[in-house]
Image (cartoon, rainbow, N blue to C red):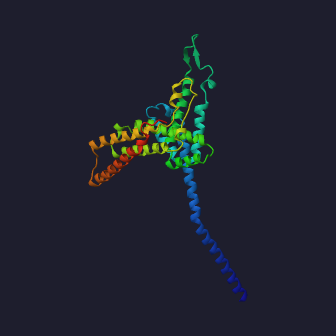
Amino acid sequence: MKNILILILISMFVFSCELTDAIKSVNKMPDKMDTLGDNTAEMERLTVVGKMKDEVENEKNYDVLAPIPYKLIAPSKKLAENFTLDEAIGWIYTRQAYVEGANVLDRYPDAIMYDENGNVLRIAPEAIAFEENKIGTASAISAVSAFLPDALINQMVERIYNGEKDSKTMIHILAMRYNFISQVMLKEKYAKSNLTVIGEVEEAIQYLYKLESIANLHFVNSINMRTTSFVIFQNANENLTYGVDVSEVHKYWLQIADGFERYLKVGAFANSDAQKQSQVVRIQNAKVMIDQGLARSQKYNKLKP
């Protein structure tokens, strides 16, 4: 009887230990599930990054680059939104090094044929395609720079102030961001004639905030790009060499204000009182932001980089 009792007590102890281990395992499951969820989300992000890289590096999307690179806008935005800061810096550095470092005459030494007077007789089609691809690549990395989230840009600026590595690349990113937003998004996509609904006015304001944040940097006069590697399309060297013209900030506030006034004369479309009231509030908020922007940007008026 005594032995049976001992066996029962041992069995109860073992069961108790097993039960405790089981409870601990169950308690750990949320942490494991969180880790699994994090890994899944990271895999999904990396998949998006890989697919969007393929898109923005594909020359089929370079056939129309001006005034707006329509085929690059969506994949560039998606790529920029899914990049980490180090990924963005690394990819942009690599692609920019290709634009600036790859010379068509190194690849095709006999690409350009001249007559005895030095006039161009013929340019090999493959050489033309090579430089066109470089122009497309420059447009792609400029678009990605423009669409990088503000949080990443703020981290980048902090790194530059701290004198960290890759500061030159980060300064180039700021230059490309400013130029693309100015010359593509505000000059073309959100030109005053295109500000036909309050959503477009709001979007234009947000892009102008991005310009203004760069114009306010202490090192703004050092933000620039210089390209010299184009042989066939030499005008590309000029187009891809630029700094930050801070006077554009005030110019674009005036443009948005003008477009906003035109929009107000047309009026908003709404299907209910709630929609009308919502748009009234948004219109009032936009008016405040525009007035503040105009006043704030007076300091940039007539200034040049």
Point out the image quarter for the N terminus.
bottom right
Relative placement, left or right, of 27 versus 297 is right
Q: Position of residue 229 (x, y in %)?
A: 58, 28
Q: Position of residue 65 (x, y in %)?
A: 47, 32
Relative placement, left or right, of 48 versus 190 is right
**At x 58% / y 36%, what residue is drawn?**
95
* Residue nearest the observer in this picture, 108 or 276: 276
Q: Position of residue 194 (x, y in %)?
A: 35, 38
- Decide if residue 5 is in sight here: yes
Q: Residue furthest top?
A: 116
**At x 56% / y 52%, what residue is drawn?**
42
Q: Position of residue 4 (x, y in %)?
A: 70, 86
* Residue nearest the observer in this picture, 140 or 3: 140
Q: Residue furthest bottom?
A: 1
Relative placement, left or right, of 10 versus 123 is right
* Residue nearest the observer in this picture, 251 or 280: 251
Total marks in image: 0
**At x 45% / y 37%, what residue is drawn?**
303
